Each structure stands twice: as structure tokens, then as C-alpha cells.
Amino acid sequence: MARYTGSDCRLCRREGAKLYLKGSRCYSEKCAFDRRPYAPGEHGQGRTKVSEYGLQLREKQKVRRIYGLMENKFRRYFEVAERKRGVTGEVFLQLLEIRLDNVVFRLGFATSRKEARQFVLHGHIYVNGSRVNIPSYQVQEGDIISVKDSSRKSERFKDIFDFNEEVTPPSWLSVDREKAEGKVVALPEREDIDFPVEEHLIVEYYSR
């Protein structure tokens, strides 16, 4: 399975935005984007005029990197969104939001989506009482997502729960931190996307 193995901080600098790919490090003084908020490379600080295509590409790359997907998978989500009823851009974002790894992150059971993906792959996450180890699993309204009993007692999960103690999940999710359990109370709406994204640019990019 193809995956990105380079520096996560380099991705934030390339997109010119803090994508919170490194969990707790992104909130510390060690954050590379805070220290060097310009594109990586020899010409990273140079002024360049961005074309319309460039704007579309950068928006697509930003969202793809936020969710940690490779291009082929990301495009397949867009193709599915095109076939569904509704506004393509909004349906597209909804499909990304209801991925299991994203839901685990949104519930505060991980400090980053990458960490959430690892937890799912390693069998720490259950859906409706059954272990699910597929990060791309699409949750449905009413699903119960929980952390394996033996796992939630580990020091790592205790640290995560302490770190995310003040984090409030989006309105379409509810969480019980004592039980390390969350519920999908509704499917996400466009206003539940809490990072700046212009999805119409992505639609335009793939509609060329």
C-alpha cells in the first residue's frame, strides 16, 4: 500500500497552513510551521504569482494532506461524490469526514489523524462492539465507536485523553470520555468542517 513517508511538517510549510499532522507537536514551540512559515526548498521565500490552476491544485493538495490520503484514493472519493445526490463539494467533504480514522480523531481518541489510522489498523477501535481495522470504513448515523477495553487503560491512551480533555467534538458526534466511547448522532453538515476549505476549487480542479 502506497503511503507518504516524508516529513509531515514539510507538508504544512508547502501548503502555507498549519494542518496539525503531528499531534501535540503542532501546539508546541517545536512546530516547524511556526518557526519557518514559508515553503520549503531553496526558493521557498520567493514571491510567485499563482495561477487559477495553481490555486485549485493547492486547495486539493491541502485537503488531501489533512485527511492523509494518496491521490488515487482521494480522487475516488470525488468520483463517488459526483454520482451522489446533492452538492458535489459538500458530499465530497462529508465522505471524507465519516471515515473511521477521522471520526476517531474527531472524538479525541487520538492526537492526529495519522495516529488514529494506526489505532484502527492495530485493532484498538471497535464499531458497535466489533473490531474494525479498516481506516476508510464509513461510519453511519447511530454507530458507536469505542476504544478496546485493554487499550484505553494503557498509558498512551491516558495521555491522549488528558491532552484532549478540553477538546469538544463537532455537533454530529457525542463522546463519553469515561467509557472511551463516542456516538455518531448525525451525518456531518458543511458547517461542521472546522478548517478553511474552498471545496469549489477542488471541484473545478477535477472537472477540468
Image: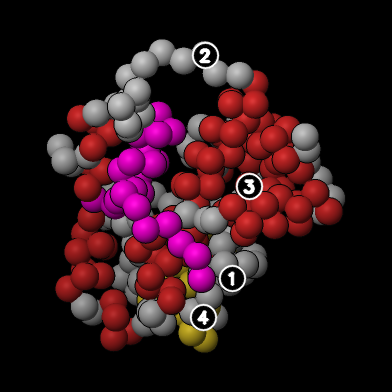
Residues at badges 4 and 1 in contact (C-beta under 8 Å)? yes
Please give left or right for residue 154 compared with residue 99 in the image.
left
| Kind of residue at disc 2 | Lys
Cα distance, mark 3 to mark 1?
15 Å
Mark 2 is surrounded, within 10 Å at the Cα level, by few (under 14), some (14 to 19) or many (20 or more) other residues, namely few
- Considering only vertical position in the picture, is 67 above or below 115? above
Q: Position of residue 30 (x, y in %)?
A: 16, 41
The image quadrant of residue 125 is bottom left
Residues at badges 3 and 2 in contact (C-beta under 8 Å)? no
| Kind of residue at disc 3 | Leu
Cα distance, mark 4 to mark 1?
8 Å
The residue singled out by tag 1 in the image is 137
Q: Which residues are magenta?
A: 1-24
The residue singled out by tag 4 in the image is 132
Q: Was residue 2 drawn as part of the magenta stretch in this picture? A: yes
The residue singled out by tag 3 in the image is 93
Q: Residue at x 41, y 82 (%)?
A: 123
**Residue 108, visible in the rendered structure:** no
- Considering only vertical position in the picture, is 148 above or below 2? below
Q: Quadrant of the C terminus?
A: top right
Q: Earlier in the sequence, mark 2 or mark 4?
A: 2
Cα distance, mark 3 to mark 2?
28 Å
Q: Earlier in the sequence, mark 4 or mark 1?
A: 4
Q: Earlier in the sequence, mark 4 or mark 3?
A: 3
